[in-house]
Image (tube, coloured by chain):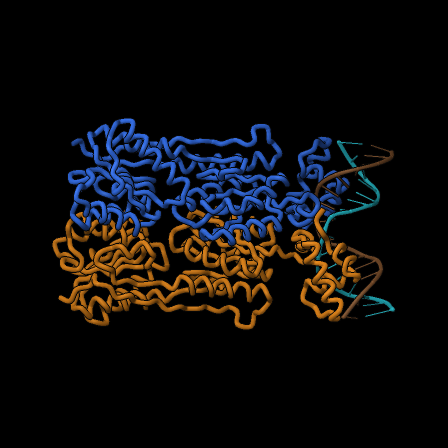
Chain colours: A orange, B blue, C brown, D cyan
Amino acid sequence: MVATVHDVAQKAQVSVGTVSRYLNGYQLRESNRGRVERAIVELGFKSNIFARGLKRKRSMAIAVVTPDFDMFSTSITTAIEQILEQEHYSLIICDYQRDKDALKRKLMFLQDRYIDGVILFPSNLAASSKDVIQKYLAKKIPIVLVDHTIPGIETDAVIIDNANVSFRAIEELIRHNHRQIAIINGRRDSLVCQERLQGYYNAMQTYGLPIQQEWIAWGDFTQYGGYHAVKALMALPERPTAIYATNYTMTVGAVLALQEMHIAIPDHVSLVGFDRFESVEIIEPPLTMVEQPLNLIAQNAAHLILKRIRGEYSDFATTIKLNTKMVIGESVKNI
Amino acid sequence: MVATVHDVAQKAQVSVGTVSRYLNGYQLRESNRGRVERAIVELGFKSNIFARGLKRKRSMAIAVVTPDFDMFSTSITTAIEQILEQEHYSLIICDYQRDKDALKRKLMFLQDRYIDGVILFPSNLAASSKDVIQKYLAKKIPIVLVDHTIPGIETDAVIIDNANVSFRAIEELIRHNHRQIAIINGRRDSLVCQERLQGYYNAMQTYGLPIQQEWIAWGDFTQYGGYHAVKALMALPERPTAIYATNYTMTVGAVLALQEMHIAIPDHVSLVGFDRFESVEIIEPPLTMVEQPLNLIAQNAAHLILKRIRGEYSDFATTIKLNTKMVIGESVKNI
DNA sequence: TTGTAAGCGTTATCAT
DNA sequence: ATGATAACGCTTACAA
């Protein structure tokens, strides 16, 4: 029915061992090499992934595990898939819906499938799966963290410098003479958010600006949250003159709220947004935004996990910190 | 290191055959059954997926293949994953980026991995992979189509009645005395869109309303497209009094354009939107919308593929046509 | 460099 | 209902 190494060996007049060695990149005599190659093409031979896995304990599959498929993780995941496909890996995706039991369950499930590596988007509750994660690492099944590290876990990570990102965003506002600056942050329990908030504090303190607690709003990473945060901020007796939203969906929510209230950007309030997905480009005026290097994140994560799978651990555990770009639009006004 | 059927057999004092039979749901003598169960728990036995696959030619993996991960396919995919996880299947995801070579390549790749079934979101270019698809079906590897069928391919599908959906949406507008109704459709080459347009035509004709070609706009399924379609429609000498947008992102684009132009919904123009994702709920006023039954689509697709994998083909090929809900908001005004 | 043969951990066939 | 054993298709010592 479907060709095996035996068939190839027979057609090429060599032994199965030789065929196998060819498949695994060993050196063969030139003449044999040619005949094996030809036999493989003629028979349409594809090596059986089960038999291969059974011997090598490798699945040629990598998992992406994320708390949910929002635009950030979806964009990165699709980019990762492109890269891994070229290396003949398949991608198994799992979202754990911000549920710590689900996370642990999925990680264990993946382990039973002899997954070759995991790219994990941690959330604050990833720490509760420390034991499983340690088990992976002990077995030399690489885990690359994306977007954030997990305190107490030593493994590779691809992250951005959140505090620095916020610092520069706020600095951009301060440079335009804003002093009353609000931040719409995600969620109190998120480490990413704590860092982004820290950057806000740093910038305000560095420039000697007073901070009001009411200017620190929490939008739960949702459009709804961003929308309501703006409504609340605009209802304050002392309105901020500028707003910094810390993710994509909250940025859109903020814009919708402002548009609805007929509060003009940037005439009535300035705005720095976050994450430039294609769909943000229609917003008028074009927003000044923090742009995360999604493709770079994906590339680094993919290459890092492939490297570890190949057994190259010389620079383990490395944390790749990527820079974000400030895209200057017209949503920040000099006052 | 890790327990095998042999270890279980030894501990339970039975043969490996008995253990295997237990694992595959055959009847055992009560006493043996108990001992095997206990041994499995005590040893933490998990059956090796490679060895199993090697014998049975089954991977316990199902693929979702989609042209891109927009909110529609992402929502459905995550719901599918929940269901398949319970059945111990893993989900391999692939997006083919609306590229027909990529589609064919991925389908062939998946076949080499002995995928047990494919859930495919076809686009207009899926037809060019007919040969691979036929090969799957000939091998009894089930393919369930979601969102649309592929002409000339006889397999299972879970779809919605697009013409009917549009008909009812337009009817809702006509019921409020609108006569000049525009449609923002996705893409000319999309069969889904052709059907949705047909429903528009049907409704207009049924109620004897004239149709102007300028009222039929194409928004390419993007936010940008929806935005520009509205701008163009509002620049017409004879403005429509109502707009029907045929997917989520175009709906959001339309709302942003209208807000920016200070064209009030529904006072200046009425709007019927499409796909109620959580994030749409902040739009003011609440939109009258077509709501696709995402969870039902996911459930039906998942259960259908599992059924076929189990070998139950009695009702093959079945097309499950689901109903959409019209959610009445406040974006349609009686004129 | 190459051939031979022993596994890898299951399932399935055949007796019993 | 159960046990023994031969596959499944590959990789990898070990010999040559």
Q: What percent of the width, then of the height, locates residue A163?
A: 32, 66
Tally of marks: 0
Q: What percent of the width, then of the height, locates residue A168?
A: 28, 68
Answer above or below: position of A291 versus B276. Answer: below
Viewer-nearest residue: B278 or A197 = B278
Q: What percent of the width, then of the height, locates residue B47?
A: 66, 46
Residue drawn at 34 percent across, 40 percent down: B275
Q: Quadrant of the C terminus of chain B?
A: top left
- In the rendered image, is residue B89 in sight? no
Q: What percent of the width, then of the height, locates residue A117?
A: 55, 58
Left/right placement of residue A216 relative to residue A95 reads: left
Answer above or below: position of B322 versus A137. Answer: above
Quarter of image, res A191: bottom left
- In the rendered image, is residue A35 in sight? yes
Answer above or below: position of A51 versus A149. Answer: above
Answer above or below: position of B269 versus A174. Answer: above
Viewer-nearest residue: B240 or B60 = B240
Residue drawn at 17 percent across, 44 percent down: B237
Left/right placement of residue D3 relative to residue B20 reads: right
Viewer-nearest residue: B292 or B154 = B154
Q: Quadrant of the N terminus of chain B?
A: bottom right
Residue drawn at 71 percent across, 52 percent down: A3
Residue drawn at 50 percent across, 49 percent down: B93
